[in-house]
Image: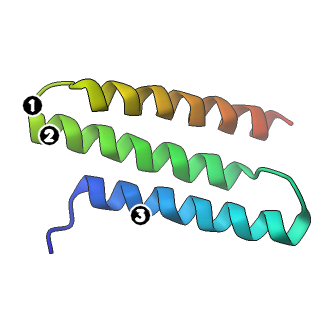
């Protein structure tokens, strides 16, 4: 099995969901900065891998960039609270 940036990115995204679900069950309906941080990191790795694989910024890369911006905004909002 090849370990690519996409693979690592997806691991971060899945890990962030596991962490968020754990803390939600533990302390109620609250989002934690670590969730948004791992989401952002995972999505950025997907974008880099897409660029390395395709050599250009395809539609999926732009969609992932949009998703990364959303995760980054959420991270900033959570940290500022």
Q: Which mark is residue 52?
A: 2
Please say if 78 is above or below 73. below
Q: Which residue is drawn at 38% across and 28% down?
A: 63
Q: Do the residues labelled 2 and 1 touch (CB within 8 Å)?
A: yes
Please say if 9 is above or below 70. below
Q: Which of marks 3 and 1 is nearer the N terminus?
A: 3
Q: Which residue is drawn at 49% across and 33% down?
A: 67
Query: Please, which residue is most extreme toward the bottom here?
Result: 1
Q: Residue at x 65, y 66 (%)?
A: 19
Picture quadrant where residue 75 is located = top right
Picture quadrant where residue 28 is located = bottom right
Q: Residue 11 carries which label?
A: 3
As measured in the structure, the alpha-carbon distance from the residue carrying label 2 to the one carrying label 3 is 19 Å
Q: Earlier in the sequence, mark 2 or mark 3?
A: 3
Residue 43, image x and y in percent? Answer: 42, 43
Question: In this rendering, would 64 be left or right of 39?
Answer: left
- What residue would you read off at disc 1? 55
As measured in the structure, the alpha-carbon distance from the residue carrying label 2 to the one carrying label 1 is 5 Å
Question: In this rendering, would 20 be left or right of 4?
Answer: right
| Label 2: how many Cα within 10 Å (few below 14, some 14–19, many 20+) | few
Please say if 56 is above or below 31. above
């Amino acid at each position: 099995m090849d370990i690519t940036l996409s693979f690592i990115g997806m691991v971060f995204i899945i890990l962030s969901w596991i962490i968020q679900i754990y803390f939600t069950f533990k302390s109620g309906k609250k989002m934690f900065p670590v969730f948004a941080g791992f989401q952002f990191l995972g999505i950025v790795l997907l974008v880099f891998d897409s660029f390395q694989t395709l050599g250009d910024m395809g539609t999926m890369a732009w969609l992932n960039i949009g998703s990364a911006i959303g995760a980054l905004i959420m991270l900033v909002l959570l940290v500022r609270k």
